Image (cartoon, grey):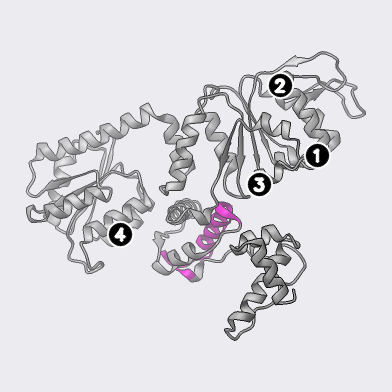
Amino acid sequence: MKHSRILVVDDDPDVLTAVRLLLKQQAGKVITERNPEQIPSLLAKETPDLVLLDMNFKSTINTGNEGLYWLNRIKTIKPNLPVVMITAYGAIDLAVTSLKQGAADFVVKPWQNEQLIGVITGLLSKSDRKKAVEPNKAVMDAEFIGESEIMQDLLYKISKIAPTDANILVLGENGTGKDLIATAIHKQSRRADKPFVKVDVGALTESLFESELFGHKKGAFTDAREDRVGRFEAANGGTLFLDEIGNISLQQQAKLLSVLQNRQVIPLGSNTPIPVDIRLICATNVPLTDLANENRFRKDLIYRINTVDIQVPPLRDRGEDILRIARHFLQKYAQKYMKSIADLDKKAEQKLLKYHYPGNVRELQYSIERAVIMADTEILGAEDLIFSAIEQAPQNNQTQRQAPEEHNLVELERITIANVVEKHGGNISKAAKELGITRTALYRRLSKYDI
């Protein structure tokens, strides 16, 4: 406790004075604040280990209990920060409610000094033990900000498969953090102290593929002026991460399959096989069903790289996580660019929650960074948030049919069907699936509207 930082928020100056004097000799630093409106700003500037928060303020910020409101704000900004509620005897019911909403504990005024110190010491000790016993989980929490059910399911799956040596295929849209997933799996594996080697195989040409992955000997080709160790050999004992695996050619797939089957590589210009011991993780933004097309990707290779697959959810499916991630980037870039920006206003929150994020977390990150750079206020508003024009640009040169301004449902249906069919290049099955109707129903509508 002697190195801890404790934030105390109460509008009663006598309470702040009493707590500060009590904890002065116990804690490393005691930060006191009378105005709860300053909480977001304080959390951006300070890194408290625990918060003591009053249940009732004289503010009219919320129609319900102010303490519950500010508890929820704190848990949104810093989900893992323990909060102890300070309450009067008559508000114990509310204090119990606060426990259900994420508070770590509560104390009743007037408290016994030994009791308050005991509560604080216990929570800080529990936090320290958690960090010591679960270092990998601490890493995960830092890299994957997510309280949503879909992310908790993902993190649980990672915790189960990471300690094994199973080959993993990570699937997901661009910008969802597939490389972070691969890194986290390595850090939680038994190979964590061994090399983690990443290769963007989708960017390798046919001529570079073998040399980059398997290595070469001096003189093996014109520019081979010295021996080079390939990525497989460099990752020996550790983890090899092959990104964009869905983009390699059939010829490259055949060479990769041979190495995975034999667990040995033969560098270019050599006849001597070198045994390799690697844990393989692959990633692609190509859907698994598309990969399984025999004309595009070998099914025998899919079975080799896909002992277990992990589907990384797009940002638009992660609900309130969007705001948690946005605030994480806000704090990061406010510090980087030395801006006193504390939080987002309600309209900014709504704008963030309604956007569809074609560029996923990467797009959100760049949007928040730009907003921080350009903003002149301490609170970001909706007008400060501008999403990427690159992500919103059309995917091809075809201009979609414009829906009519009048609300004619028949015409809107015709336009919608035409756009979806065009989007999928005339593939009726995919168009029907997106529209939520059967192929037969779609055919009827195509005939009806003469599309």
Please rate how many residues cluster around mark 2, counting C-alpha atoms within 10 Å: few if below 14, some from 14 to 19, many from 20: many
Q: Amino acid at mark 3?
A: Pro
Query: Mark 2: which secondary structure?
Result: helix
- The residue under label 1 is 249
> Which labelled disc corresponds to residue 233?
2
- The residue under label 3 is 287
> Which labelled disc corresponds to residue 38?
4
Query: Mark 3: which secondary structure?
Result: loop
Please rate how many residues cluster around mark 1, counting C-alpha atoms within 10 Å: few if below 14, some from 14 to 19, many from 20: some
Q: Main secondary structure of the magenta part?
A: helix
Please rate how many residues cluster around mark 3, counting C-alpha atoms within 10 Å: few if below 14, some from 14 to 19, many from 20: few
The image quadrant where one finds the C terminus is bottom right
Q: Is residue 374 above or below residue 157?
A: below
Whether residues under marks 4 and 2 lie with C-beta atoms below 8 angstroms apart, the answer is no
Q: CA distance from mark 3 to mark 4?
A: 46 Å
Q: Nearer the viewer, mark 3 or mark 4?
A: 3
> Which labelled disc corresponds to residue 115?
none
